[in-house]
Amino acid sequence: MDREFFTVDCIKAIKKRKVKFLMPVTKNDRVKKEMEEGHRRVVDFEYGVHREDPVNFNLGIVENDKEEVKTFATNHDVEKDELEKLFDMYSLRWGVETSYRVKHQFRAKTRTKYYEPRIFLFLFSVCLYNLWVLVNFQVMKKFGEDSKIYMTAKTFTDKMVKVLPLPEPPPTNRN
């Protein structure tokens, strides 16, 4: 989840429903103090200590490849040597963020008030988006995950516009 969900009430609601979670931690003074005591460790952390009903979770502290210290909250049972794996799991969610950021680039514009063409264009844009994801997935498979080769959404849609035939204009009804 996003950092915005890092509140006592949200964490309580998630834990009450027995849902596994992983989210970045807001770095308050207590978290910074834990970070100073060492990296790559798991701490049983109590959050909301000035409230009547604080919440506990596992605070993971790990250093990434760029030597930046990252902290996250989770209710996963995680060992010290599994922290990087959990941190890598969180980075997989950026595909979702990308989809929200680029989905408008696949949408066709229309002024029609008729339901059928509007739903067709929406579903067609979903298919184009999925095709773009598939193309980039195949490139990643062929050249490796660390490859810097990929196709941007803008490039993909520009190429598709060139390939797809132009629609015929609607018939004019002149009596």
Image (tube, rainbow, N blue to C red):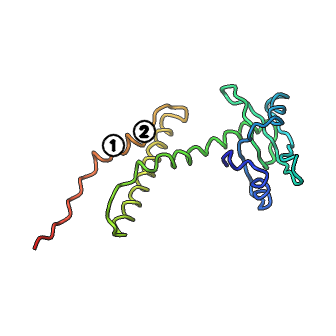
**144 with respect to 69 (left or right):** left
Total numbered badges shown on the rendered structure = 2
Between 62 and 12, the one nearer to me in the picture = 12
Quarter holding residue 39:
top right
Q: Position of residue 65 (x, y in %)?
A: 66, 28
Tell which residue pokes out farthest to the bottom in this image. Answer: 175
* Mark 1: amino acid: Asp
Quarter holding residue 170:
bottom left
Helix, strand or loop status at disc 2: loop
Q: Residues within 10 Å of mark 2 (few under 14, many from 20)?
A: some
Q: Position of residue 16 (x, y in %)?
A: 80, 60
Q: Quadrant of the C terminus?
A: bottom left
Which residue is depicted at the point 85% across and 43% down? Answer: 45
Q: Position of residue 102 (x, y in %)?
A: 46, 46
Q: Of tags 1 and 2, which is closer to the observer?
A: 1
Earlier sequence position, callout 1 versus callout 2: 2
Q: Residues within 10 Å of mark 1 (few under 14, many from 20)?
A: few
Helix, strand or loop status at disc 1: helix
Dots 1, 2 in contact, CB < 8 A:
no
| Numbered mark located on residue 158 in the image | 1
Identify the residue under disc 2.
151
Q: Does residue 95 sit above or below 111 in this rendering?
A: above
